[in-house]
Image (cartoon, grey):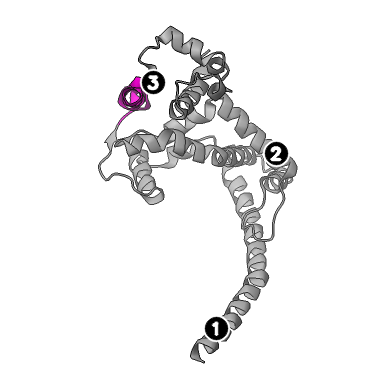
Amino acid sequence: MRVAAMQILYAIVFGILSGTDSFFLPAINSVSRRQEFQADELACIIGGTKSFASGLRLVHGAGLAWNAFCSQELAPMFSAGFLPPIGDGFAVFLKAPNVAKAVDRGIESELQEGKAEAYDSHPPLRDRIATIANLPSDGGSEDTRTASSLLHDITITEAVFLYAVFQDVPQELKSVSWKEQGKLLIIPSWMEFVGENAALINKVTVEALFEALGDGLRSGFGIRKACSSTLNSAFSAHALSWARRLRSLW
């Protein structure tokens, strides 16, 4: 009897909370979106309309590429015990041709098709840029300083950010430059991988390996199909990852 009463009470409470979410959250987020427009206007007054609009697009584009940078570049480094400059590395990552093109496509898509949903706390980029364009110009100077220049010690700030955002980060990290990535991480990982799979390619020369992989290595696509039957799927996947990197060098 007590269990049945608790189930009824739970159903009533859950129903009330569900109704509250469906009514109050859209209203709260609607207010939040209006506040974001006001914050944008204040930012334009302080830093200049053009500078803020440019920064808004940059931040949005960076958000599109951040997860890829973390998983492909940053996470392997700190998992190995190294801490490179996060901001500098991300800036270089954003300039990579394939990344830059993907980011540009994402921004253009948002500018063309972005729309606000009831549960969004921020307005879409398209609406924010359009609102900024309609603000009156005060003729003031534009603040062209980078955001990083406003930080007193970017190294400490990045370390604090790293431990706050990522889990399972080693407590002791050695500060290194991105130029050391090849020597400290990429080459050792390749040597370890080749050592584990040496039996699969012990009769294959470097020249023959390119022939075995075929044109898939140069195109960066279809490499799994191009691999000979003696190369297992793990090697094929690893080769595919690096073929895409090699493609940018050719």
Sequence-first tag of 2 and 1: 1
Mark identifier at residue 200: 3
Foreground residue, 92 or 11?
11
Query: Which image quadrant for residue 12?
Result: bottom right
Q: For label 1, count other residues whose C-alpha is less than 10 Å away and answer few (under 14), some (14-19) or many (20+).
A: few
Write down the residue under mark 2: 109
Give the residue type at disc 1: Gln
**Which residue is outermost to the top?**
207
Residue 21, placed above or below residue 49: below
Q: In 3D space, how far apart are the residues under numbered discs 2 and 1 (Cα atoms)?
A: 47 Å
Write down the residue under mark 1: 7
Give the residue type at disc 3: Leu
Residue 54 image point, x, y percent: 61, 37
Residue 176 image point, x, y percent: 31, 30
> Position of 17 compared to 183: left or right?
right
Residue 248 image point, x, y percent: 53, 18
Foreground residue, 47 or 219?
219
Q: In 3D space, how far apart are the residues under numbered discs 3 and 1 (Cα atoms)?
A: 60 Å
Q: Nearer the viewer, mark 3 or mark 1?
A: 3
Q: For label 3, count other residues whose C-alpha is less than 10 Å away and answer few (under 14), some (14-19) or many (20+).
A: some
Give the extent of the magenta segment.
176-199
**Residue occupying image coordinates x 55% and y 81%:** 10
Sequence-first tag of 3 and 2: 2
Give the residue type at disc 2: Ser
Q: In 3D space, how far apart are the residues under numbered discs 3 and 2 (Cα atoms)?
A: 45 Å
Query: Which image quadrant for residue 191?
Result: top left
